[in-house]
Image (spheres, rainbow, N blue to C red):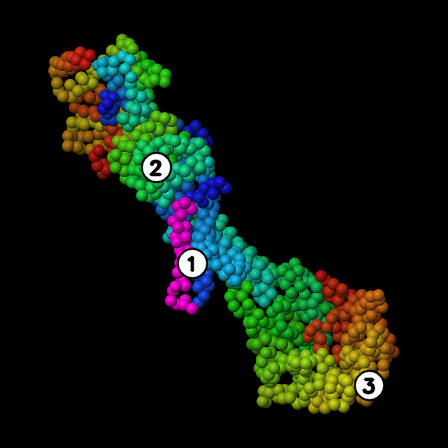
Amino acid sequence: MGSGIHVDFNDAAPIWHQIEEGVRRLVASGALAPGAPLPSVRELARELRINPATVAKGYQRLVDAGVLQVRRGEGTFVADAPPVASEAERRRELCDGARRLAALAVTLRASLDEAKAALEAAWEELVQGRKGGA
Amino acid sequence: MGDATVPVQVSGLQVRYGAHWAVREVSFTAPAGGVYALLGRNGAGKSSIVRCLLGQQRASGGRVWLLGADPWRRRATLMRRVGVVPEEPDAPPALSTRQLTAWCARLYRGWDAGRVAERLRRFAVPVDVPFGSLSKGQKAQVMLALALGHRPELLVLDDPTLGLDAVARRALYEELVDELADRATTVLLTTHDLTAVEGIASHVGVLAAGEMLVDEPLESLKARFRRLRLASSALATPQLDQLGLVTSRRGPWGLEVVVSRLDEGGAARLAASGAVAVETMNLEEIFVTLVGNGAGGAA
Amino acid sequence: MRTTLLVAWKELAERKHVLFAAALSSALPFLAPLAPWFAGWPPGEIRLAAAAVVAGILAVGVAVIHGSSTVAGEVAARRLSFLLSRPLGSFAIWTGKMLSGLVLAWLVALLSFLPTAVLGGPELLRDRGLESFSEDLHLVILAPLVLLLLANALAAMLRDRSGWLAFDLVGLAAVALLSLWARNELETMTGSLGYLVETVTTLLQVVAVLALFVAGAVQVAAGRVDGRRGHRALSAVLWGITLIAAAAALGYGRWIAAPPFSAARDAGGVVPAPTGSWLFVEARVPSRGNVSWLWLVDAASARALRVGPDAKIGRLSFAPDGQRAVWSRSLSLGEGSRWWPSAARSTARTVDQLVTLDLAEPALRPRGTTLLFDGVRDIELSASGRRVAVVDGERVAVFDLEGERLLASLGRPPEAVVFVARFVGEDLLVVFTGERSDDRGWRWRMAGLAVDPSHRRLVEVWSCDRAVSPSRWFANAAGDRLLHYAVGLSDVKGGAWLEREVRSGNVLRTFPSEPEWWPWAGRYLADGRVVLAESRGRSGRLRVVEREGTAARVIAVGELASMALGPEIRPGVLLLWAERVIPGPPPQAVPESLAVNLETGECEVVEPGLRFGEPAPANLFGHTVDVGGLSASLFRTENNALVFRDPRTGARRTLLRGR
């Protein structure tokens, strides 16, 4: 998909949350550079065939968090300096992700080391990719 | 009693055909600006409810408010503010789309002829061909265009994608999304096209045999339903009941249980405890679990 | 209104192909003259007739198809929801649909007819008379509406296929039954006059059309997308309204049919019994349809019996003792269609039944006999009241009333009309027959017919061709002599009163009229003397002749324009009905009743301001002696009130109020 955002109805997370996460991921990975324009609510909703209110809610949360900014009459853009999340929030989200990985690892009967190795590999890949992308 | 700010309010509605109860004691509310999806199998009573809401049919019992008024008595006035896409396209087959839009333009105050024309052009509906000779998809687009032409506050779609192919269905939903993006129209939608509606609906009501099984925001519905795969007796029955046991069956990979009272933390704890696989469910799966009654088949 | 027109526009636009078809079919009349079986006919006429037929068929077809499809059809096809989900009121939907049907039917008729009218010759239309078309115009305009509404109701009933159809059939039967009953009720009274029947029938038809319209509106408003519910609503309203209307019509008919005597006004014909206190009165009931009724009233007790509607009661007669009455009642309800009151019914022959009533019985119960006749012209009871003579279209016949059996009869002479038959005694009938002659109006024949029960024949024992008008004859109290006026006699110049022996017909005495004296009337007194009333110029006189011989005493009665002899109030006192002349200018004739004392020659005006009860048609031919009879006590006022004057006390009582 052109926008690079996917919505998975099988995911327990609400769709607005998935959009929020997706945009954050794109911004974090540099796929969306600071100041880059985002698809309008209407475009994204139409493309994903989801309720525009849902898209708007995701966008609004990102605007509130300072990740995005709205320029009246022009549209929505990535903020010039996307803020780093607050310490508590960062930790909470990190823990959430870790819990998900841990749950998966337990289900797969993987050892902690195996899980760590996988995490490191993913890390490497992401950092590499960012450099390549930039 | 009728609240003018609530587009659709149904309270204890009953519809009876002779000895057959099509709808028994159904209550729900579609909030303003939301998309309420009324789901149910064929014959679950969806169309009866819609007809009562539109003042086309008299309720056998209970009450119905449309934009705060009694639709049976105030049908004609209410229809100025409501757009309807019926189950079967009911426009006069002998009239061309051009005649139909011209007729509607004279019927409604504030008819948006430009938008209607643009919408029809986008789908390349031939405007001089009799409505009866159009394809199903074109008919659906024309019905939607006619329903939206007067900028209704409430849009009622009674199984609009019935009999449409995938392309036509997709086009219709795109139009609907467009409309929602432009004007936060309240939508009441009945369908069994669950995948398409999942992204659009804000609220869902699930009907089975004339009774309402579920009436809540889609988000909360999805948050509380989980499928658990258990290795034999990892969880005791009282524990499952506490989690809101909906169904349990023996699947190819052991016991499959659907519970309806699970939160994110609980799910994580269960998953961590091992011996239990916790899976999220999409709307279709939840629907089938609720309505399928086991005999309805797997998702 | 706007929404109605919008609905109508949509319906018309949907059916514009029908208009094209109508325009195409307008060519058909131009082809009609080419058809071989019309060879030799004037082509213009054929075209016009064909155009009318095509237009009629198309209009009827369109109305029926549109009516049956536009509501019930759309409900069945689930397409009525298109209109119901727009801001259109149910009534606008209904009226719009009906309006479009009407306009379509009219347009189709017009389109198919127009080319013939324009090209085929306006002169032809002019020849045929545009009026003849405009006469049918209301039919052309209204018929599609009625057909539309009927088709809609029928379609709603039949498409539903539910048990309510049985309810519809019951409703239809009930409405038809009630309306027919109501019609019968009214028709029985008004007979061939029928204005009430026509009014009620027209009203019922209008109500039926209105009911169809209202029922259709309710069908749409209450049924909406539910065909069964719509059918039920339609049926309930349709049969409700029409049943109420039919029941009201029936109630009205029965109310009209049962007026009390106190509501009667304006005495028409009055027939007093020769003795006793009963009389027949013909009087209208203005408060109940202004139907004219015949009543039997006892002047002494003011008891009254409604004999029947005047139109249905034919001739009537009292027995001489006043204790029995007989009349003929028409059984025919008229022929021709029940439904179209305009159908000619005047040519229908009537079947009349003889009804008798014993006035001596406390419960007045008329008894219909088994004796039926083809148009009774006259009825007469014999002196004993046991025999009845009946003149009908075929014959003069005498029956025994007890056994209801024929005693004797005589066929009517061809060309002649039997006007009157009177018993003299039990065994002799005096019969007047009239024949229209070219030069002098009626030619009369008077005859004595003897009853011969053994051969069941009436045997003519004597006859006289010189008799004048059936009103100028009289029998004496004993029934052995009669007096009548005759002209053209061989031995008398001018006219003369003849006295005949009843049995043989032999002339016993002749009382010639003096020149220029006009013979008004002649009668016997109770004591057998003869009184003749005559006038010359304006002076009237009575001649009183003794039992035997021809010597006469003359009593002058003053200036009179006309005179008639009434009953003998007391022996020797005779009533004289006269028009008294009051010298002008301008001279006026005032009706007056005079009591003339034949012994002293005194004339006294009786009850000034009142007239004697006018002799009713049957009594016009009164011919028997009746001393102190009821007729001497009945008076009428200027506005036809009927007043009874007690002969002993002189007290007056109004029997029947005036106009």
Dot 2: element:
helix
- Where C598 sits versus A16, above or below? below
Dot 3: element:
loop
Q: Position of residue B171 (x, y in %)?
A: 29, 32
Q: Position of residue C93 (x, y in %)?
A: 45, 44
Q: Is residue C21 magenta?
A: yes
- Where B184 sits versus C281, above or below? above
Dot 1: element:
helix
Chain ID for label 1? C
Amino acid type, mark 3: Glu
Query: What residue is drawn where x is 30% and y is 34%?
Result: B123
- Where C31 sits versus B217, above or below? below
Q: CA distance from mark 3 to mark 2?
A: 116 Å
Task: Tell me if I can see residue B36 in this picture.
Answer: no
Query: What residue is drawn where x is 52% and y is 68%?
Result: C336
Q: Which mark is residue C54?
A: 1
- Between marks 2 and 1 in the image, the one whose residue lies nearer the viewer: 1
Crowd band around label 1 with a 10 angstrom C-alpha radius: few (<14), some (14–19), many (20+): many
Q: Position of residue A26 (x, y in %)?
A: 24, 16
Name the residue that disc number 2 marks: B142
Amino acid type, mark 2: Val
Q: Which mark is residue C546?
A: 3
The residues colored magenta run: C11-40
Instruction: Name the one closer to the observer, C296 or C147.
Output: C147
Q: CA distance from mark 1 to mark 3?
A: 86 Å
